[in-house]
Image: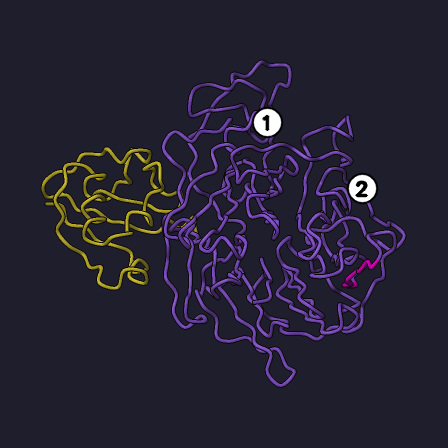
Chain colours: A purple, B yellow
Amino acid sequence: MSHHILLGTRKGTLIVDRKSGRWTPRPIAHPGVSISFAARDPRDGTLWVAMDHGHWGPKLSRSRDEGRSWESLTQIGYPKGARFIEQHLPTPDQDPSAEKATTYKEAALLKVWVLAFGTKDQPGVIHAGTLPGGLFTSVDGGDHWELDRALWNHESRGGDLFAGDATSRNQWGGTPAAIAYGEFVPGIHSIVVDPRDGNHLYVGVSSAGVLETRDGGKSWHGCNRGMLNDYLPNPEAEWGHDPHFVTSCPAAPDRLWQQNHCGVFTSDDGAGRWARVSKNDVNVHFGFPIAADERDPLTAWVVPAKGDDQRMSIDGGLFVARTRDGGASWETFRKGLPQEHSYDVVYRHALDARGDFVCFGSTTGNVYVSEDRGESWQCVGNNLPPVHSVRFA
Amino acid sequence: MAWVSFTRHLQRFFPTLEACEVPGATVRALIDELERRHPGLAHYVIDETGRLRRHVNIFVGEEPVRDRAKLADALAPDARVFIMQALSGG
């Protein structure tokens, strides 16, 4: 059981240690810098942080001495010629009947949204999901990074725009998470590595859906069968889905979980087919994060929110829901969590489970941890910065 | 030789950074020379396409740099250049 938690917050990195049964944050690292994601590489213990400097551009930071010192890394960058098809937010004077020429934009890194580590037999392999819509992989522990060109050039994005103009229609929509950067571009927020085979990956894209590779990123295909959306004329469209977070059960990697804009979904056949397992009678439907149990493929946790029209706690009370039967039923837990005047929302990377421990952090700077699989909660802090990510370390 | 000054906030990442004389016919050439002296500094000012970061400003004299895409603005031999963080990024 991990006795450390890494928090990526709006104002820096917090390492929280469990000592004598109490969870206590250390002094903040990267003070003042917005941290989009923080996690420990379980293979060599390196701590990794994705920094989102307000002025100075996105960068990575790593610590090889348990957070005593940090090294900034500037190597992730799109190669020359990496272009994407521009999308624009609708404007009041837009004429939908007007034919618009396809325009292209040269990619520059806006944000490193998520990091994922390769398998035990792939030392040094690290993956990064980015805005705009990139998957980068390092094979040398983060010193050099390569854009996955097969995914970048996928037919669902217009084809190989390094070589020329689009040869197919772009199916990847922008993510609202990009609007803060003055752009409307897709983003990769989920990377699922199959622990049995490091060449088998899934990525979750906002907003397109889930894609899979079985050959280490040389080829990709969409796997969104069974997905449903509530905002397109065809609810079963192949593309246009909005996964908020995608994860899998490490002990049974064919069991995938997805908290989607349009409900909670699961798959028991490696994303061959998804099934919606939301339960509106217990308010399990909308939300951003989902955590899978390490061992039991049927157990997962979510932190539901009122949405998508409000995006805050439901009726002022914060709760966590857990299923132990693959989503057929959900239990809700409120002990130790505020039940009035709570307006918290929990972002997609801000819930994690490890053994019996579960932890989440909210946009209003509240962090709670459970040591009994989510049934009761203790507060780690109420006045922390807005929390972007929570990972046991 | 242009005289270059920096927002003090860059010293957090480059502690030895001080105002200095730098050769360069254009703002981009000046950035390249600064990168040679302080490896990694350019990444804080421009992105991988060479574009000035959205929330960074460079002034030549009291005028903001005109070419934010390529930083091709020419520099007079006695130019004074200021690399600042923009108010918009705070």
- Mark 2 or mark 1, which is nearer the start of the sequence? 1
Location of residue A192 in the rendering, given as x and y in whole percent from the top left corner: 61, 48
Question: Amino acid under label 1?
Answer: Ser
Residue drawn at point x = 61 percent, y = 77 percent: A23
* Element type at mark 2: strand
Residue A104 shown left or right of residue B25 in the figure: right
Q: In which quarter of the image is the C terminus of chain A?
A: bottom right
Q: Identify the chain of the residue marked 1, using the numbered disc in the image.
A: A
The disc at residue A275 is 2
Report whether A8 appears left or right of A378: left
Residue B20 lies in quadrant: bottom left
- In magenta segment, residue B72: no
- In the rendered image of this protein, does residue A110 appear above or below residue A42? above
Q: How crowded is mark 2: few (under 14 residues within 10 Å), some or many (20 or more)?
A: some
Q: Nearer the viewer, residue A194 or A379?
A: A194
Q: Position of residue A200 (x, y in %)?
A: 59, 43
C-alpha gap between disc 1 and disc 2: 23 Å
Circle 1 sits in a helix, a strand or a loop, which is it?
loop
Q: Same chain, marks 1 and 2?
A: yes
Residue of label 1: A156
* Magenta-drawn stretch contains A319: yes
- Please tell me in which quadrant of the rendered image residue A333 appears: bottom right
Q: Which quarter of the figure is the N terminus of chain A placed in?
A: bottom right
| Above or below: residue A158 compared with residue B37 | above
Q: Which residue lies furthest to the right in this view?
A: A281
Region rendered in magenta: A317-324
Q: Furthest residue to the bottom?
A: A20
Q: Which mark is residue A213?
A: none
